[in-house]
Amino acid sequence: VKKFCISSSGNAAISAYAYSKLSDISLDIFISSKLSTEKLSKLEGAKLHISDNPKSDCIQFSNETGAFNLRGSVDDNAYIGYYSLAEEISTLDIDSIFIPTSSGNAALGIHQGLKKLGKHIPIYIVQTTKVCPIASLYDKEFTKTESSLVTCITDRVCKRKDQIVDL
């Protein structure tokens, strides 16, 4: 595959863009019109599609052009990429992990990676009062908000929600 697209709140797009510059691949990036100027500056020179609906626009672009959609939240293997982080974490002297969670890939991957290594370190999911499909199952005493200072927790559906709740 040489043609890719990604919708992102910034972090994944920045990583994918850095890789695309080192490789012979085409990458179209779909971002929100509200993306911070700091993150936007790291995407200078990229093929950007700025939108109020970056996820759905990216899906439509993928369907129309055949570009492979790098949306990790729907890739059944995306969490495996976090196994190496679990290896690094396993060498630390810590008794718990707090993970800002959007799609759940990081939490699931770190948990599974630690499990493969025979380590048990409790993992706590952190979400905002704006986007909280997992945290809201446990914390009933918060006030839902329409905005958040956090710009990377955007997955309101969280495909891996059931897996993470089971953990």
Image (spheres, grey):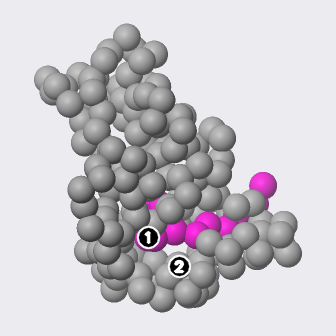
Residue drawn where x is 64% and y is 51% of the image: 74
The reply to whether discs 2 and 1 touch (Cβ–Cβ < 8 Å) is yes
Q: Amino acid at mark 1?
A: Gly
**Residue 97 shows up from this direction:** yes
Residue drawn where x is 31% and y is 62% of the image: 128
Q: Is residue 90 above or below residue 31?
A: above
The magenta segment is 1-15
- Give the number of the disc on residue 31: 2
**Residue 100 shows up from this direction:** no
Q: How crowded is the residue under tag 2: few (<14 C-alpha within 10 Å), some, or many (20+)?
A: many
Residue 67, image x and y in percent?
Answer: 77, 66
Nearer to the camera, 56 or 70: 56
Quadrant of the snapshot with the N terminus = bottom right
Q: Secondary structure at mark 1?
A: loop
Nearer to the camera, 122 or 87: 122
Q: Secondary structure at mark 2?
A: strand
66 relative to 31 in the view: left or right: right
Nearer to the camera, 146 or 98: 146
Q: Quadrant of the rendered structure where residue 60 is?
A: bottom right
Does the segment drawn in magenta span residue 14? yes
Nearer to the camera, 28 or 104: 104
